[in-house]
Image (spheres, grey):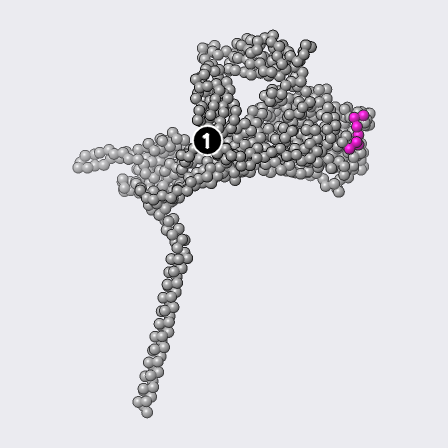
Amino acid sequence: MSVRRAHEETSKSDALVRKRIEVLFVIFALLIIALIARAGYWQIYKADWLKSKAQDQWTREIRILADRGDILDRHGNPLAISTSCYTVVLQPGVIKEQAEILNKDNTDQYIDALCEDLAAVLGLSPDDVKAYATKQQNQVILMRYISDKTADAIEGMQYSYTVEKSGVTETKTISYNGILINSDMKREYPMGSFLTQVLGFMAVDGNGLEGIEGRFDKYLAGKNGKLTVETDREGVKIGGSLEEREEPVNGDNLQLTIDVTLQSFAENAVEACMNEWDPESASMIVMDPETGAVLAMVTKPDYDNNNPPRSDYEMLRSLTANKNVSGLYSPGSAFEIITAAAAIDTDSINTNTFFNCEGEKTIDGQKLNCSTDEAHGSISLNQAFLNSCSVAFMEMAEEMGVDTFYRYIEGFGFGSKSGIELYNELAGELTPEKYVRDVELARIGFGDSIMITPLQYAAALSTIANGGERMKPYIAQKVISNEGKVLKEYSPESEGTIISDYTSDTILEYLFNIVDNGAGRYCQVPGYEIGGISGNTAKYDDEGLIIHDAYTASFAAVAPIGDPKLVVVLLVDEPKAGSNYGSKVAAPYIGDFLEEALPYLNIMPDSATNENGTKKEVPNVVNMTLEDAVNKIKQQGFGCIIEGFDGKIVTQIPGAGTMLEAGDNVVIQLAQVSDEGESYLVEVPDLFGLKPTEALKLLTENNLTMRIVSSGNVVLEQYPDKGTEVLRGTQIAVEFDYYEDDDEETED
C-alpha cells in the first residue's frame, strides 16, 4: 500500500514538473516571438526613423540659401534687394580640442589669442567673443552679415606658438580651428529711409514681417536648398565623404506701381512739412485717378529699413504703421465735395441753388455752428465752398436723407476696405444707417461724425477726377520670375460709375476755383491749373471730449484740372507751429510736389503762352546761380534739366530768345571745372552684363545716375556708351534684359 502511494506521489511530481516545463517553454517561446516581433518592428517599420536618427549623429545639413526676390518700382528701379554676405560661426568643442592639443596645461592661451584676433577684425570686445567661444554648444553664431573683406581677414588669421625640440625653440603658425565662415544673404534697401512703411522689413530668420515684404513673402522668399555632409563628433565635415545636394528655388521679383522719382518728390515734400510744422505725423498719397494705381505713399516719421529699431517694440510698432491705410481721421470740410457731388447727382441741388446761413443751425435740439462762426447769409454753392459754410452742407445732407446720402458715401468707398495689397487697412468708422439721426446726418454733411483713411479719401477724389468711375486702388503691379516670366499681374479694375460726367466736371470746377480764388491758393503751381480743397478738424479723446489744441489738417489736390493725371492727399496730424488750417499747413507742400512732378511726367503747362500763340520766349539764365536760373525758367512755364553740380550757369539749350513750346525743357549746364580747378567731367563706365544693383552701385560711385529703359536681370545696352566723358550727375539710360545663369549657385 505504501509502495503504491509512493509511486502515485512520484507520478504526480513528474507530471507537475512536466507541466512547469511546458509553461516555461511557452513563456520562453512567447518572449522569443515578442523579441523577434520587436526586432522586426524596429528593423522594418521604424527603419527609416532609425536611419534618420543615425544620420543626425554623423551628418549635418547645410542650408543653401535661395535668393529672395527683388522689389522694384514701376520702371524696374530696385527698392529692396538681396546681397551675398557671410556669417561667423564658432565651434566651442573644436576650439577647446585644439587648445588642449597645443597646450593641455594652459588652454586659455590659444582661446584668448583666437578671441583677441577675432574681436579685432569684427570690432567686438575679446570678452564678448570668449563668451561665445566657450558655450556648451556644438556651434554658435557670433556675427551675421559680414563682408567679403572681413571674411577674408578672418580666414587669414594665424596663431603663433613655440615648441621645443632637442633643446631648440621653434616658432610655428597654424590657422585657427573652430571658426566657420558660412555664406549668408542680407536684405538691403538701397534708398534707406524711403517708402518705409510700404516696404516693411525682414525678421532675423529671413521671413518678411511687415509691409510688402510680409504680404508677398510667399512669392519673394523662394525655397532654400540643402547640402547633407558626413561629419565627425564635433560637427566638422569629413574630407572626401559623400554629399547629397538639393538645389534652392530662388524667389520671384515683385514690381510695384510706385514711381521712385515721384516717391522722392513726395518724401521731400513731407519732410519739409515735418520740419516746418513739427506734427505728430504726416502722410501723403499720390494716385493715378484713371487706373487707381498708387504712385507714391509716404508716412513720417519713419526709419531706415536697413536698421529698424527692433530693440524698442513700442517705437517699432508706431513707426511701422502706414497711416495712409491705418490712420483714421475726421475729414472736416474736405468731405464737402462728397456731400455736394451726391446732392448734385441726385438733383437735390444744382449750381443755381442758394443756401441761407445764419451762422448756426439747430437740429434734434442741438445747436451746430458754422465752421467760421459767422452768418454768411444767402450764399451760392460756389460761395459755400469758398467760405467752407457748414450750414450749406448740412442742408444738402438733410435734403437728400439718410438712404440716398449713404448710398453715395458707401459708393465712394467710405465705411469699407478698398482691398489694396497692404497690411492693416482699416474700413473707417461710419454709423450704421438705422442709428443715424438727423443731427448725425447733418454732421456727416460737413465732414464730422465720420472717420476715414487718407487712402479712402484719395480713392474718392480720384473717382470724381475720373469722370465718376471708381477704380480700385492697387500698389502691386506684377510678380515676375527670375526668367522674366510674368506669374501674376494686377490690372486696373473698375468698381462702377458713382456719379455722372456732369457732376464730376462741376465738382472739379469748384475745386479749381478754391485754388485759383480761395484758401487753396498756397497750392498754386505757375503755368498749371490745379484743383484742391482743405480740411481741418479737432481731435477727440476716448470719452468723446475735444482735446485742447489738437487738430488734423489736410489738403487734397487734382492736377491738372482739365485732364487729371494726379490726385494728391496730404494729412498732417497735430501741427504745432501756429496754425491748424490745411490750406497753410498742407497745401504748400502739395504745391511743391506738383511743381516737380508735373514736368517730370511731361505734362504740359496750361498757361505758358503769349499773345502770339502757344510759344514763349526762353529767358537768359547764363551766369545766374542755379536756384535763380531754375526759378526763372519755371516761372515761364518750362521744364528744366540740370547738368553738372556747382557754380554758375555757363550754357543753356536752347539759347535765350528762342521761342519754345509750353512745357518743353530747357537744359542748363553748370561749370565743368570748379574754382579750385576740379573737373566735373567723368568717364561713363562699362555696364554691359551687370545686374541692376551692380550697375546702380557703379554709376553712383562715378557720380552718375541711372534711368532704367527696360527691366531685366542684366544690362544689355547703355547710353551714352562706355568711355564717353559727361558731366557729373548725368543720367545714364540703361536697357536690361532677362538671362538665366545656369552656373550660378548660392551655398551656405
- In the rendered structure, the answer to whether residue 322 lies left or right of residue 127 reads right
Q: Nearer the viewer, residue 469 or 441?
A: 469
- In the rendered structure, the answer to whether residue 552 lies left or right of residue 349 reads left
| Three-letter residue code for mark 1 | Tyr
Kindly identify the residue that appears in the image at 57 percent across and 27 percent down: 259
Q: Looking at the rendering, which quadrant does residue 153 occupy?
A: top left
Q: Is residue 260 above or below residue 64?
A: above
Residue 629 visible to an observer of this rendering = yes
Could you classify mark 1 by the number of other residues whose Cα lies within 10 Å: few (under 14), some (14-19), or many (20 or more)?
Answer: some
Count of residue discs: 1
Residue 249 falls within the magenta-colored stretch:
no
Q: Quadrant of the C terminus?
A: top left
Kindly identify the residue that appears in the image at 37 percent across and 63 percent down: 36
Picture coordinates of residue 32 (x, y %)?
36, 66
Q: Is residue 134 above or below residue 15?
A: above
Magenta region, residue range = 346-352
Residue corresponding to mark 1: 739
Q: Residue furthest bottom?
A: 1
Task: Specify the principal SS of the magenta part.
Answer: loop
Q: Looking at the rendering, which quadrant does residue 592 occupy?
A: top right
Q: Is residue 90 above or below residue 710?
A: below
Q: Nearer the viewer, residue 93 or 37?
A: 37
